[in-house]
Image (tube, helix red, strand yellow):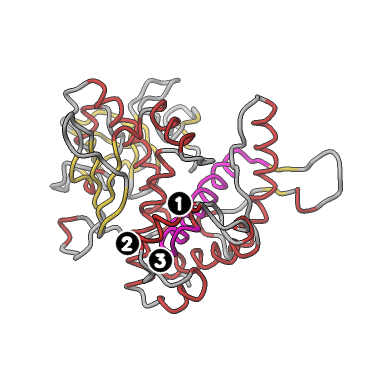
Amino acid sequence: MQLFQCQACGQRLYFENVRCERCGRALGYLTDVGVLSALEPDGAAWTAYARPAGRYRFCRNWEQMGCNWMVDAAQEHTYCAACRHNRTIPDISLAENLINWQKIEVAKRRLMYAILRFGLPHPTAASGDPEPLVFEFLAEVPGGPKVMTGHDNGVITIALKEADDATREAARASMGELYRTLLGHFRHEVGHYYWDKLVRDGGHLESYRALFGDERADYGEAVQRHYRDGPPVDWREHYVSSYATMHPWEDWAETWAHYLHIVDTLEMAGAFGISITPTVGDDAGTQTRISFDAYHAGDVQTLLDAWLPLTYAVNSLNRSMGQPDLYPFVIPPPVAIKLGYVHELVARARGLG
């Protein structure tokens, strides 16, 4: 994620800002140029400082403060490039649903930012693609079925209850997870979607199976075994998380999610000009200066050489505040190889590899 700047007054801006705190101008994200822009009203539309020649409308979901992305006023679309993927949202006439849906939309836009930055395919239901990327945000109703977060043939379902901090934390603790966030759910589930697109449809099944295992293993049996027996005792030597040990599909999705964690966090660290140089010790592996575009890194080692020192620093800062580690994971060599595999497929998908 980047930092942005108000084109009218120079104020530093953050991705979710909807109004400049200094000059008061409305702000909107322009997907065609990848910039959060100051806006001026122009009749029924808006003129963007970042692209004065164009005229824009806010996404229809802006009316519920659910989206700050813009649509080209010359297009017929009423929803932005992110919200066109929504198929189902909860009943937002209910105040609690509205609040939780807004939280989900924040995480979704961060996911879609990454997809656009990578240049990954993201067909909508209207595109005619046989497996479009579709989101369903579902609330449980009394007497109705339990809503499970997951992916099925291009449809990513996020249970609305995951947006409730107390409920999500209770689930994290009861399941013994180190990390559980809305954005993490999106990144993991979209990993399953891109397994379909990049591995299965991309002709990479053999290389995938050689690294992650054979996905044809019975998934239901794998789930039962995982929750009955737990992960292998040596899982930390081969997997990024215990959940990744359950099935080759989950190993891929967990690795994919961590790749997105790494890239997006490094981009933000670079935007802040962060460098890590401990005042004691002489281990070069704890030092870094993040001065590159993480979304276009030439190889995964460039990312890891910056990521590991950054995690040592931020984890130590969190501990100083009495908080758990920001990144409570270890990246052993086999996981680094898997991350490199994801990196290469992403590069190929945008025509760089």
Residue type, label 1: Arg
Does 96 sit left or right of 180 as displayed? left
Residue type, label 2: Pro
**Label at residue 228:** 1
**Label at residue 274:** none
- Marks counted in the figure total 3
Q: CA distance from mark 3 to mark 1?
A: 41 Å
From the image, tell me which residue sits under label 2.
121
Badge 1 or badge 2: first in the primary sequence: 2
Residue 251 colored magenta? yes
**Label at residue 350:** 3
Q: CA distance from mark 2 to mark 3?
A: 8 Å
Does 289 sit left or right of 146 as displayed? right
Q: Quadrant of residue 270?
A: top right
Between 251 and 79, the one lying in front of the other is 251
The spot of residue 161 in percent (x, y) is: 31, 32
Between 306 and 72, the one lying in front of the other is 306
Between 213 and 23, the one lying in front of the other is 213
Q: Residue at x 47, y 77 (%)?
A: 207
The spot of residue 160 in percent (x, y) is: 29, 34
- Relative to 313, residue 194 above or below: below
Residue 44 colored magenta? no
Residue type, label 3: Arg
Does 61 sit left or right of 203 as displayed? left
Q: Which residues are magenta?
A: 245-274
- Relative to 77, residue 345 above or below: below
Q: Quadrant of residue 39?
A: top left
Q: Secondary structure at mark 2?
A: loop
* Magenta span: chief secondary structure: helix
